[in-house]
Amino acid sequence: MNSSLLLSLAITGGLVLAAIVAYNAWILHRNAPKKALPPDPDRPAPVAGDPLLEPTLRQEPSLDADLGPSNAASYANLDQGAEPHEHTVDAGDALRMPVPTHSLERRPGLDPLIDVIASIQPEGLVSGDAALAALPPTRRAGSKPFAIEGLNDATQQWETPAPGQRYRSFQAGVQLANRMGALNEIEFSEFVMKAQGFADAINAAPDFPDVLQEVARARELDQFASDHDAQLLFVLRARQAAWSPGYVLQNAARVGFVVGAMPGRLVLPASAPGLPPVLTLGYDTQAALAEDPEQSAIRDISLSLDVAQVHRTEQPFARLREVGAALAEAMDGVLCDQNGQPLPAMAMDPIAADLELLYDQLDARDLSAGSVLARRLFS
């Protein structure tokens, strides 16, 4: 009798132990990161332009330009960068200040709309080789980009000095503002020193604008930029099982993303080569660099849009909504704001309306989103 009882208890204990082991195995399997599906042998070989290409076959363009809250109520869920700096200059007075009468054409080089420009007039023609030898070793004055251009004697176009060319005049410029803030007096002084050194080397006379006027223009432009800078960030969070990097790459490739220049970064390219990406997808860098990435668990990814860097004709916010919805459905995730709060569909339309207003305000200032000047100013 005792032996039968002991045998029954042993069998029961074995079954319970087996059930526990099976349950734990099921839990581990359920919580294991989702992995990319193997290639389908019945699928035709990929061709150029196929969005289902393996992500390692397509990479971020090498000319990708990477990349404050001024009115949080107007731009819900928008990270608008740093708070505007305190300014003593009156914005109306600064707007009425005369702009240097250089070419007002919107072109890639120096532009009086966002640059301080000093003319440099040599006594005669200067070769491109001599100009290149006289250029300062660095292209920044403090935190602001600095550049020198020459008026090509043959083409009558302003350009960066080049070997074998001849130039009849030059201009030096420093940017009035960027995301590091407004040009200050110290940076203006450094600009003057660099431009003066170049002028002395080519036996030329520089003509500098008034420092107080230019610093005031810089502060006004910085105030405008701070008030109109917007970076939109959504977070896609896993509902249950985490994702492996390969699973993220595979699903992102299906909606047009390509591998970025940095680990854990993918980009949705613009319609024209050499432009900043329309959208950026990011995930944990350590997961991307792990020895066995497929064992890394990713529970959320970010989808970001740098509004001023992308032209409105790309319809970046509409694409952000589409991509977010597609990835949420395919990866069993929920779309949230940067604070982790789920974003209902009804929250998207007000953001879209705010962005259209922002685009109009940038257009009115000749700083249209995605333009060369906007990309320089908001950098």
Image (cartoon, grey):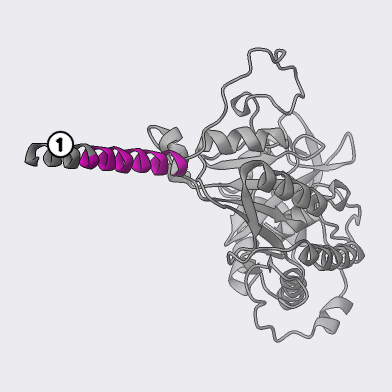
Task: Give the image quarter of residue 226.
Answer: bottom right
Instruction: Tell whether 375 sits left or right of 103.
Output: left
Instruction: Tell whether 150 sits left or right of 259.
Output: right
**What is the x, y in percent for residue 180?**
61, 65
Which is more toward the observer, 136 or 29? 29
Give the class, few, some or many, for how many residues have Cα within 10 Å of label 1's Cα (few <14, many ≥20).
few
* Segment colored magenta: 12-30
**What is the x, y in percent for residue 345?**
77, 61
Q: Compared with residue 254, is residue 168 higher up or lower down, i.e. above or below?
A: below
Residue 371 located within the stretch drawn in magenta = no
Q: Quadrant of the C terminus?
A: bottom right
In terms of secondary structure, where does tag 1 sit? helix
Instruction: Tell whether 85 sits left or right of 274.
Output: left
Q: Compared with residue 46, is residue 210 higher up or lower down, i.e. above or below?
A: below
The residue pinned by badge 1 equals 7
Residue 249 in view (yes/no):
yes
Residue 27 located within the stretch drawn in magenta = yes
